[in-house]
Image (spheres, rainbow, N blue to C red):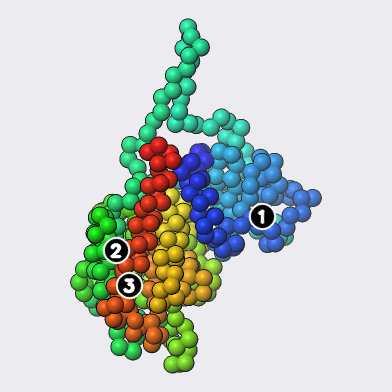
Amino acid sequence: MKFLGKMLAVFSLVATTLWAAPAASSSTNKNTVSANKNVATTAGKIDVEVFAKSKNASFHWYPVQKTFSLIADRDTIKFAIGLPYVYADGKSIPLKSAPEFRDNHIWIDSADTKKLLVKAAVAPASSTSVTKNSSSSTTAKTVSTPKNETAGTREVKTVVIDPGHGGKDSGALGAKAQEKDIVLAVGKLLKKELEKEGFKVKMTRDKDVFIELGQRANLANGWDGDLFISLHCNAIDGKPEQKKQVKGYHIYVLRAPESEEDKAIARRENKVATLYGEKNAKEELSPIEWFKLEARLEKYKQNSYMFTEELLKSNDGGKIRKQAGGVGGAGFMVLVGALMPAVLYEIGFISNPDDEAYMMTAKGQEDIAQRISKAVANYKNAVHNYRETLGR
């Protein structure tokens, strides 16, 4: 099992510095799981925190997903409560029994510990191999370079714009406008702005047609995109006074939701899939499904955070201000299949009279498109600069 590569480690550091993710999804458990080390084993089980300490590994608990991970020097292993296997390096390993949460401790079978973190004491694999010449003390170094870099590690060239909804699916409705029309107009303007910056740009739809949620990610993958931006308008149901108060933009990345509000927004955006009978459609992902997704998401989430940070900065001083912190996470089905850094951007509340009026104007749409374009350009530069530090 290989530990996370240098790229992810540094990006993680950058993302942590620039944008502190909510504690529930990233911090070491301090309250939910007791730190009472006197209770180490029981009935063939071992306290996972005690086991982690014995291997000099860090323990991370994610209460929303009911998952946890152990991170040692060269191993990262991910578990889910009630699931009898673990994920490591993108592969599943069966366990004798599923982890349990009991008496404020997380327990794993002591028999399973023999197959976990077994490489913690082994020298790390390196892209630089050193070969000793039997007749000389001279060493020769051979450096391997990646042949097919994936999205998130290579230069940012292709951007996929996904105007939400379309055709028979109008999306959210305002007093005068429809979500599908606003996001399509912004998407077209954004395409022009990005092309001026030299990007190759693809759109999942460039007219008023319906595209299934699953197909949108498939299109992006087929185009080998480097960044996926799904455009939407937010909305609430309520009395006119409530609608006047709730306004602003919000950026979402694909991660387990940490509030009922984020869950509700994801269900609303995902409802189109179930409404129009998409195969395997669902409004919400289960904790087990999140767990299965986690290994794949690890490849892209830090870059999604990096782009989110640039989008937040580019919106400073804009007419539409951020709602609350401006950033959230939820199980948006349109993002699930995208094999690249991806965000869902709710550009404003169509249910709010001020946001709707601004999003309907040519000036407002142009402003929104230019701010997104600026964020993409800055994100591209950040990735390029990082690659230069690696000599790529």
Q: CA distance from mark 3 to mark 2?
A: 17 Å
Image point 51% across, 38% down: which residue? 1
- Left or right: residue 100 versus residue 178 is right
Q: Is residue 164 above or below residue 300?
A: below
Mark yes or no: residue 276 visible: no
Mark yes or no: residue 237 visible: yes
Closer mark to the observer between disc 3 and disc 2: 3
Residue under circle 3?
A: 367
- Residue 240 picture location, percent across and down: 43, 92
Q: Amino acid at mark 1?
A: Ile
Q: Are marks 2 and 1 in contact (CB under 8 Å)?
A: no
Can you tell which mark lies on residue 106?
A: 1
Residue under circle 2?
A: 161
Image point 52% across, 40% down: which residue? 3
Dot 3: what SS?
Answer: helix
Image point 55% across, 38% down: which residue? 74
Q: Are marks 3 and 2 in contact (CB under 8 Å)?
A: no
Q: Amino acid at mark 2?
A: Ile
Can you tell which mark lies on residue 328?
A: none
- Residue 10 picture location, percent across and down: 50, 46
